[in-house]
Amino acid sequence: MNIGITVYPTYGGSGIVGSELGRELAARGHNVHFISSVLPTRVTELNDRVHFHEVEMMSYPLFEHQPYDLALATKMATVARAEKLDLLHVHYAIPHSISAILARESIKEKRYVPVITTLHGTDITLVGADRSYLPITRYGLQQSDGVTAVSKFLKRATIETFDFDDIEVIPNFICPGQYSRLTDSPLRDELSPHGEKLLVHVSNFRQVKRPADCVEILANVRQNGEKARLVMVGDGPERAAVAYRAEQLGVKDETIFVGKRENIANYLGVSDIFLLPSELESFGLAALEAQACELPVIATRIGGIPEVVNDGESGFLSDVGDVQKMSADTLRLIQDEEMRRAFGVKGRELAIQKYSTDMIIPHYISFYEKVLHETGKRTSSLSASNASGTQER
């Protein structure tokens, strides 16, 4: 198949999943065309099967803001025709599904290119639920030829918000070979020079991730006499506030900000416990990646996280904002090495059994084939009807 993929090329779950999906599809013999303003994250190599088409936005004094959605639609239509794409797979409903639908409609007389929209979370739970965006988001869902969601939770949320239920749940995934426990690494010595236990958090440091709660957990753990450090991977608007909170709590020197990193698996692989105190997660990709590296997960019992983390088996779940329980659970895992290792082994087992590429990528391919079959029948029927009408006239 010839597949066009559009993602936000940012440090976040949807960009990571879209990039990894494209790479995996190319490895299975499909041609993948990334259509984006910047080369998506984790797309490190272009070759005969992985291509990149840059969306260039026009600068014109009349426009207060550059019209990204229109530029994207134009590029999609151009690439779809030039490369004879079989389908467009867009990640995030707004504006990507709207741009793809506009592209599809603009060239359908020459070539019908089905649009598949994958929902990742905030496009539905935050942006989509905004009254001003609700009608256009619903339109994007209804006009897509296929819609997928990354969790059962997100499917339910979409049904409740938009009264739209024609959704296939295809969860996020990991490539097991890219994640592992690193028992002998110089990075561990660098981050833990005195044998401290390493707590780690990975996110885009938005308020919804509650990164400051991680600092609170670290402070509580150290107040109970345990030597620990906190590794904060990523960057975003809350970083300065988190650093200030660490200073207030007296754990500034034990909180390590490493910024955005491509080699996230290395930081997970040398750590001991993963912290995800978010107030909303539609799936929890970072938790899945942590489990694949045999890290127990301390997280909140919200959204799609309970689908990824088994409470009491691969981690502990708490209510949002219950820092005391999360701290107590972290202490239990620090103080009980046997439990910590058992949770880690179970977490990797669950990650591979339910969310490995060998399980999920075929699901996507099967869904593509289903959509192509259904749209093929529809367009054939329409062509026959048009031909019949022409003859009658």
Image: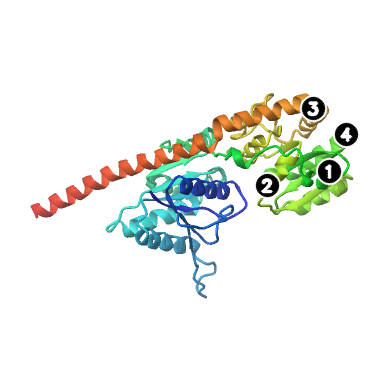
Q: Are marks 1 and 4 in contact (CB under 8 Å)?
A: no
Q: Does 69 appear above or below 212?
A: below
Element carrying mark 1: loop
Q: Give the percent coordinates (x, y) of residue 190.
A: 82, 48
Label 3 – label 1 distance at C-alpha = 17 Å
- Earlier sequence position, callout 1 versus callout 4: 1
**Residue 260, x across and y down, in percent:** 69, 53
What residue type is disc 2 on? Ile
Along the polypeptide, which appears first: circle 3 or circle 1?
1
Q: Residues within 10 Å of mark 2 (few under 14, many from 20)?
A: some
Judged from this view, the residue extending furthest toward the bottom is: 61
Q: CA distance from mark 2 to mark 1?
A: 17 Å
Read off the residue under disc 2. 264
Earlier in the chain: of badge 2 and badge 3, it is: 2
Decide: few, some or many residues near mark 3? Use Cα within 10 Å; few <14, some 14-19, many ≥20: few
* Residue 166 x %, y %: 41, 37
Counting residues from the N terminus, which is met first, the one under dot 4 or under dot 2?
4
For disc 1, the neighbor class at 10 Å (few under 14, some 14 to 19, many from 20) is many
Q: Which numbered marker is on residue 192? A: 1
Above or below for 261 versus 229: below
Quadrant hosting residue 324: top right
Is residue 51 placed above or below 229 in the rendered structure? below
Disc 3 + disc 4, Cβ < 8 Å:
no
Marks 3 and 4, the one that precedes in the sequence: 4
* Residue placed under numbered mark 4 in the picture: 226
Q: Amino acid at mark 1?
A: Ser
